[in-house]
Amino acid sequence: MKSYVAILGISLIALVSCKKAEETPKVIYENEQKTTEVNYQKIDSTEIKIADLPIKFDGTNYLLHPLGDVRVYNTGSSKYGSSKTNQVSYTISNYSSPEITGFISNIMFQHKDSLSLKPLTTNRMEILAITYLDELALKSQRQLLVYTLVDADTNKDGRYDDNDIKTLYLSNIDGSKFVKLTPDLHELLDWKVVDDKLYFRTIEDINKNGEFDSKDAVHYASVKLLEKECKAEPYNPLN
């Protein structure tokens, strides 16, 4: 019995070691190890997308149409036998005020009294969350959206997903002045709004090993949301 347990333990260690070896780093650097910029891929106009029904945040005049892909899921087996079956989902986003979440490749903006639509971006992206700053709007009449998204295939696996670096963006309620707040190749940790300021933290892969861990540097920044041009200003709460 002891021999069996020992063999099982060795097998589990080997299995864990193999899994760790197969894990893909979040960043794969091309050419020089000191790369600090990413290349943004343009949207392929030949790709066929679908749109969710429009979403309108309370107190605003703009409709948001989330765009994305039809998703096919493998259920493993059918109720009539052991053969695999596929289920198709046409749902791109989920809305729970004041936030939209999902796997969104772009947003089309439309004024409620207009027929014209305008895209948020021409770059390829995977938008994971959109938050309307409703409390700020009530206090100041400034209507802003905060985005958590992936804007580059940083691990070079051909996909834009949670395995790539997450970034923070900001725009007006109509999609204009869409601006990136986090530095290139910094992973967003979290963000929050206090009064009229947005605070966020990022982590930088300072040893360029492709992973984010305790040996890397955490950075802090804030954004004055009532300024005409919103931009991130670094600060250090540890000083």
Image (cartoon, grey):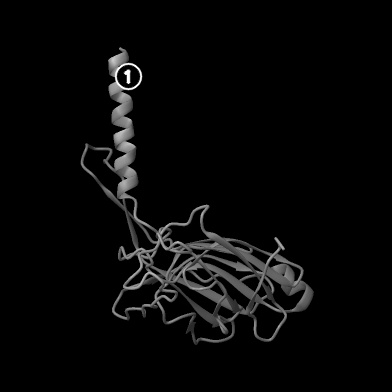
Q: In which quadrant will I find the N terminus?
A: top left
Residue depicted at 72% across the width and 74% down the height: 137
Farthest top residue in view: 1
Query: 190 and 86: which one is in front?
Result: 190
Provide residue 154's location: percent of width, then percent of height: 38, 67
Between 70 and 44, the residue placed more toward the observer is 44
Quadrant in the rendering for residue 111:
bottom right
In this picture, is 58 found above or below 61?
above
The percent coordinates of residue 34 (x first, y second) are 41, 72
Q: Position of residue 20 (x, y in %)?
A: 34, 45
Res. 230 in view: yes
Residue 229 at x, y percent in the picture: 65, 85
Quadrant that contains the C terminus: bottom right
Residue 80 vertical placement versus 41 (above, below)? above
Q: Amino acid at mark 1?
A: Val
Question: Which quarter of the figure has residue 5?
Answer: top left
Please tell me whether residue 16 is drawn above or below residue 156 in the rendered image: above
Residue at the location (45% across, 61% down)? 207
Residue at x 39% of width, y 75% of height: 124
Could you tell whether 60 is left or right of 49 in the image? right
Residue 156 in the figure: left or right of residue 144 = left
Rendered residue at 68%/86% (across/down): 228
Count of number-bearing discs: 1
Q: Which residue is mark 1?
A: 5
Q: Could you classify mark 1 by the number of other residues whose Cα lies within 10 Å: few (under 14), some (14-19), or many (20 or more)?
A: few
Q: Secondary structure at mark 1?
A: helix
Report if residue 74 is visible in the image.
Answer: no
